[in-house]
Image: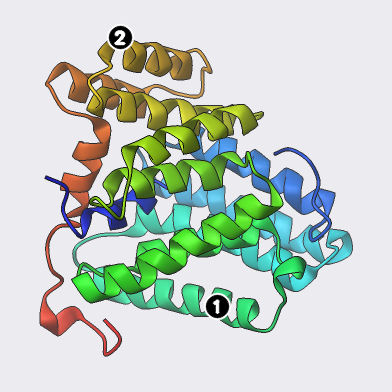
Amino acid sequence: MKSLLAFAAAFLFCFSCFAENEISDYTLSKILDFVTLRVQLKSIEDSQEVLAVINSLQEKVFEELPSQAKDYEQEKQILSNLYFMEGYVRRLTKSNYASLRKEMKNQMNDCHKLMEKRSEKNLSKWFYVTTADVTSYYMTRSLAASFYWGFKVKDWHKKALKKDEYMTAANACLANWNFYAPAPIGSNKKARQYYKNGLKGARTLGEKYMIFTYYSQFLYEEKEYAKAAEYLEMAYELDLGTQELDLMKKCNEEGYSYLQYMRDKSGIDEEIPKEEREAED
């Protein structure tokens, strides 16, 4: 049975090539490069090494951005979201969870403030997707907060799709949302269609890896084991690193999907202790 909170986990995994009017070609190229780089970083076990790569890249990009950006404020926010989230995963420990959660809240609030003062037509699909991702990282393990933020996250991904129907990141996240959400809120039929749309839009290696792996594990959950293995093999053939893929394969061999593994690991079905919550949780 699907948990009422489980759909919140859909976005913890969770990131076309055509230039948008809202952001510069420079920033779009940096976004797409990072979508691929973050996959390659998964196979580096040393978190300090990964953080050094991210910090060095961010420093270089932010130095160049003022002279390249079409919309500096928005483009810096998008890139900051990407770098912050990837670094967050490597920095997070049980001892620093509370302090890092406050940092994530600040990141989220910066996104929301920018969204509030802009019209939808002046916001990039990547702004909507990364804002949704940051918000999803912040979502608490409480029913009220999960519903409140979960439906906002869903709406932002849909706004991204209004700008690009086949955007891989938005389709993948909406597919996961529908898979995790209990019926009648969620729908595996809708999830499958979003995954297929994401496959149509995947152009870069990083986008292909994202949608191949998600769709593979969805197919495993649907008991379409041969097809699941086929898409997992397609992800291997991208040659972006095998550490995460090997874990997916191991999970499948032991009788469960990587989607289930990540949900269990995240503890998303557990309530955050009252003493760790904030007023709006």
Q: Quadrant of the N terminus?
A: top left
| Image height of 58 relative to 99, above or below | above
Left or right: 58 in relation to 223? right
Residue 272 seen in the figure: yes
Q: Of the numbered discs in the image, which one, if any, rests on residue 112?
A: 1
Question: Crowding at label 1, few (<14), some or many (≥20) Cα neighbours within 10 Å?
Answer: some
Left or right: 246 in relation to 212? left
Q: Quadrant of the C terminus?
A: bottom left
Which sits in the foreground, 236 or 58? 236
Q: Give the residue drawn at x 23%, y 51%.
A: 182
Residue 65 pos. (x, y %): 79, 61
Q: What type is the residue that disc 1 sits on?
A: His
Residue 43 pos. (x, y %): 40, 31
| Image height of 191 relative to 108, above or below | above
Q: CA distance from mark 2 to mark 1?
A: 42 Å
Which sits in the foreground, 20 or 164? 164
Secondary structure under tag 2 reads helix
| Image height of 246 relative to 184, above or below | above
Q: What type is the residue that disc 2 sits on?
A: Ala
Q: In which quadrant of the rendered view does residue 159 lie? A: bottom right
Residue 130 pos. (x, y %): 55, 59
Residue 155 pos. (x, y %): 50, 63
Q: Of the numbered discs in the image, which one, if any, rests on residue 226?
A: 2
Q: Give the residue drawn at x 22%, y 29%.
A: 257
Secondary structure under tag 1 reads helix
Left or right: 136 in relation to 160? left
